[in-house]
Image: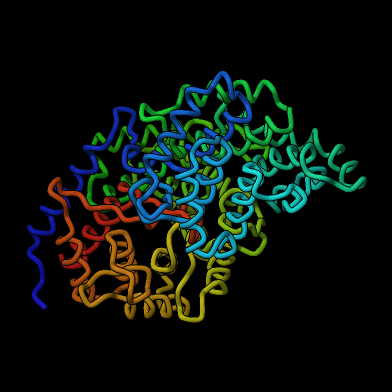
Amino acid sequence: MTSLRADEISEAIAGGAEALFSAQRPDGVFDYGEHALTSTLGTVGAVSALHFADPAGSADLIARGAAWLERTQADDGGWSMVPGQASEAGPTAVATATLHLLGDHESSVHKGQTWLEGFGGLAAIPHAEVVAWCRQYYGFAGWLDPREMRRFPLELALFPGLYRKLFDLRAPMVSALGLAQTRHKPLSRVHRKLSKLAEPKALDVIRQVYEHEGSTGGWCEDAWVTGLIVAGLARADLGHDMVARAVGWFRETVNEDGSWNSGPLDLTWSMYAAAGLLEAGYREDARLGMTKELFLRLQQDQPFVAFGCPPGFWGWSGTKGWPATLETGEIVSALCHLPGEDQAESVQRGVTWLTLQQDTRGSWGLCVRNTKVANSGPCPHMTAQALDGLLDSGVPVDDRRVRRGLRWLASAQLPDGSFESVWYRMHTAGTSAVLQTFAKAGLSGEPAAVRARDWLERTQHENGSWGTGAPADAGTVEETAWAVSALLAAGAPAESVLPGVRWLLAERERDGGWPAARVNEYVRHVSRYANPALANGLALRALARYRKAVR
């Protein structure tokens, strides 16, 4: 197969880099919010919370939000997390129940119910947690008797460590909805007494997060998360100051079209853009210097008490965002490859945080150590990213932290050689990330790495691209770039990935960038969204690695 001209690759890299830089704000953030954030879930969360917390004072917002939901209902009767995509069961269930709760939306409600019946109902949703949230909304709508509702064991809040492990980042939402249940769900005498004892502790969890984020009224800067918490507090008639501030926050953050957003991803966008640009040779570019300053500025110096996290982490957004292994590992790696010495202390604090957050089994999850909660960890992809951060910072391969992490990864490999990824769909992302980590550690010949490489090689499509690993799933820029980069890192010859590189070149858009696919999991297997910074950063990294391999 004929190789590509060196100038062809370099031109594509230069065009892709400028497309990335065109999205950069003066504060260093690579901002793709206009592509990803307007959200059915966010709008449902806001409207339902305002219905319980301030029905008269926020009647205008409620009406606008309901009208937006009706406008964005798909022709088939369903909703997706981001309007215009294929209908998804979770967003459809909560949007349908909310419109029924508000009244006067019978046609939309009927169409939504019909779609759900055709899907198989709530029982067909492949995620127990999502079913639980949907049942909450069915309870709001009066479609479920309170006695049929799953009880949130509020008494576990009396044991903070256990509470965090059982509920992870959901602890504030579980606390609020559990508090509401003490007023609306029939409880046994024992459960009622235990709930009464636990009420102050559960309220503390909510307030700890509220105050950590600056008492803005928005939890996680996300209307869906905030909506769940505020609906629970309002129905429990508790936390009046937090509820009042949240009502104001909803008014401050509503979009002109009447919708609300999921949380911004300032640091997630920026870390993937920076990683691609660094691989492509833009290390000394002054524009990346602005992003370096962003990373240093947004590292958190206060513990996140509600989740038992020490300081030194990064979240996915904001100066006071929720802690995340994924972002912390990636940003530590980026800082290690950026020029200068002023980031050394920041890198060390990030390494210390990652060290303290490693599970006793050797893995990493999202933010709570030793949790097993679905969608939060332990996760092979997050573990690989944490290990990359340690290795890039200079931690040796024979260090106990690295050895334990690699050993856990080998144990987490699926029988076919692939690896899971909590935050990205199916298996190409996780398998690529883990293979790259083994290669970074100089262990490409280890059995787990060899099996991962074999899996990637045999799941490539005939056109050169990669998708989920299933033959019927079309290739995406993200998954193709992940696979190309990982195979090159593991020592695969450049000619073996050339079809993938050609496919990436053919997918370029007119501005030099690449189209984003819905490979990012908001809730695994249930709601997905696209992240253009991820697509463009990964594509740039893959082309840059190929260029190095053929020089």
Position of residue 208 in the picture relative to residue 539 (left or right): right
Q: Point out the residue furthest to the right here.
A: 189
Q: Quadrant of residue 361?
A: bottom right
Toward the viewer: 422 or 290?
422
Query: From this viewpoint, is residue 217 visible?
Result: yes
Residue 64 x, y percent position in the rendering: 43, 29
Quadrant in which the C terminus is drawn: bottom left
Residue at figure coordinates x 76%, y 50% from the top left: 151
Toward the viewer: 35 or 101?
101
Residue 389 x, y percent position in the rendering: 46, 53
Residue 76 x, y percent position in the rendering: 38, 55
Q: How many marks?
A: 0
- Residue 313 sits above or below residue 246 on the image: below
Residue at figure coordinates x 55%, y 41% from the top left: 100
Q: Point out the residue furthest to the top here.
A: 57
- Residue 10 sits above or below residue 22 on the image: below
Snapshot colouring: rainbow
Q: Quadrant of residue 57?
A: top right
Residue at figure coordinates x 39%, y 46% from the top left: 73
Position of residue 442 in the picture relative to residue 315 (left or right): left
Position of residue 136 in the picture relative to residue 393 (left or right): right
- Residue 248 sits above or below residue 321 on the image: above
Query: From this viewpoint, is residue 401 visible?
Result: no
Position of residue 96 in the picture relative to residue 158 (left or right): left
Toward the viewer: 220 or 489?
220
Residue 191 x, y percent position in the rendering: 87, 47
Quadrant in which the N terminus is drawn: bottom left
Q: Quadrant of residue 229?
A: top right
